[in-house]
Amino acid sequence: MTKKQKDLLVRELTNGMRLVDVARLLRLTVAEVRAAQNADKDFAREIRRAPIIFKRYLLHIVVLGEQNWQAAAFILERRWPLQWGKSGSDRP
């Protein structure tokens, strides 16, 4: 993978896209991305950080009650249901 591809991949993951979709966008396979991760530990670290940055962004929207905070909450619930979905005691 080129540096440009790696940078774009990390940016799109940070924006909330899933790895498989970004790989397709870049005309790469997930196996090619995984091989690049194995060869470049800094790249691997950035890939691991990207979803955390996206989650932090969504939490910021919800906590501050910004416009469309409900959409951010919905994404959190759907993307990370164990952490942000309704717990058993909250369900009717």
Image: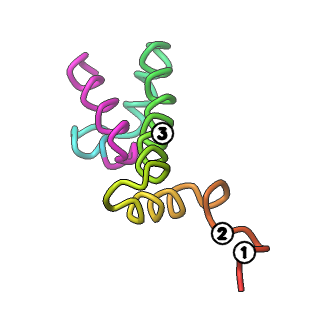
Q: What is the quadrant of residue 46 in the picture?
A: top left
Q: Specify the farthest residue to the right.
A: 89
Residue at mark 1? 90
Q: How many marks?
A: 3
**Residue 43, percent from left and from top:** 42, 18
Contact (Cβ within 8 Å) of mark 1 with mark 2? yes
Q: What is the quadrant of residue 35 in the picture?
A: top left
Which numbered dot is residue 71? none
Kindly identify the residue that appears in the image at 61 percent across and 58 percent down. Answer: 84
Q: Residues within 10 Å of mark 2 (few under 14, many from 20)?
A: few
**Residue 57, percent from left and from top:** 41, 41
Helix or strand or loop: what does disc 1 sit on? loop
Kindly identify the residue that appears in the image at 24 percent across and 18 percent down. Answer: 2
Please state which amino acid type lies under the numbered disc 3: Arg
Contact (Cβ within 8 Å) of mark 2 with mark 3? no
Residue at mark 3? 56
Q: Start and end of the magenta stretch?
A: 1-21
Q: What is the quadrant of residue 83 in the picture?
A: bottom right
- Quadrant of the rendering where the N terminus is positioned: top left
CA separation, marks 2 and 3? Answer: 19 Å
Kindly identify the residue that appears in the image at 77 percent across and 73 percent down. Answer: 88
CA separation, marks 1 and 2? Answer: 6 Å
Name the residue nearer the viewer: 58 or 21.
58
Helix or strand or loop: what does disc 3 sit on? helix
Residue at mark 2? 86
Name the residue nearer the viewer: 87 or 11.
87
Kindly identify the residue that appears in the image at 72 percent across and 68 percent down. Answer: 87
Please state which amino acid type lies under the numbered disc 2: Lys
